Amino acid sequence: MNKLSRIIGVATLVLMATAGPVLAARHQPDHMVPFKGSVLALENGQIFPTPEAPLDCPAGAEWLFFSRGTGQMSHLGRSDLDLTQCSRYLEPPFVGQSEGTTTFTAANGDMLVLAHDLTFEVAFSEFPVPDGFEGSGTWTVVGGSGRFANATGSGTITVLGDVPTDDTPMYDLPAGATSWTFTGMIAFDASNRSNK
């Protein structure tokens, strides 16, 4: 093997050794950045189990709650929220616990998926008819697509909800609406965009 061949061989090995980590780094999430925003959800409801249609929830759940709306979220911009959670009461006076999933969809189709766990309390102005509820908890990134395909992160979630009754709406919300607020930190690959 002549000297030129050895130089080319060594150079090739060096390039191969360094290219792998560089290419892998391009697909890793960027550093952690603040994540925050809120969504006003006007489409909300509860599904209770029946013998014909049991809940698709873990044992102990008493109902499935869903919430859909649009809001402004950092790194997603104007985006849609689709939230479902399995809920149950823990103890009087109507304190409960919910576990579920929130999917944010940006205008270009990129999605960020969070798993959340929160506790809530139902508010009454005159028992037994509920007027609203409020809750708080935590969330963790569990999936995504586009620039959020390999996202990580966690934070807190709060919710205020109005139960549509003849009374004055709670928390200055439209009748039957919920307000969801998310804060925390996430990491994602901003260069990886959806094809949509």
Image (tube, rainbow, N blue to C red):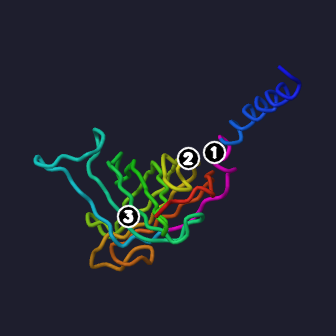
Say above or below: 62 vs 195.
Answer: above
Amino acid bearing label 1: Gln
Residues at discs 1 and 2 in contact (Cβ within 8 Å): yes
Q: Which of the marked residues, 1 or 3, is nearer the chain's N terminus?
A: 1
Viewer-closest of 191 and 101: 191
Q: What is the C-alpha distance between the residues marked 1 and 3? A: 44 Å
Q: Is 13 on the left-hand or right-hand side of 42?
A: right
The Cα atoms of the two marked residues, 1 and 2, are separated by 7 Å
- Residue that numbered label 3 is attached to: 123
Task: Please state the horizontal and vertical placement of residue 31, each as a whole percent of the image.
Answer: 69, 50
**Rendering coords of residue 178 (x, y %):** 40, 68
**Of the numbered discs in the image, which one, if any, rests on residue 28?**
1
Name the residue: 36% across, 60% down. Answer: 122
- Front one among 195 and 181: 195
Magenta region: which residues? 24-38
| Crowd tier of the residue under label 3, counting other residues whose Cα lies within 10 Å: few below 14, some 14–19, many 20 or above | many
Residue farthest to the top, as pictured? 1
Viewer-side label of 2, 3: 2
Q: Position of residue 134 (x, y in %)?
A: 43, 62
Give, as a three-letter code, the residue at label 3. Ala
In primary-sequence order, the first of circles 2 and 3 is 3
Residue at image mark 2: 150
Q: Is residue 15 left or right of residue 155?
A: right
The reply to whether the magenta stretch includes residue 29 is: yes
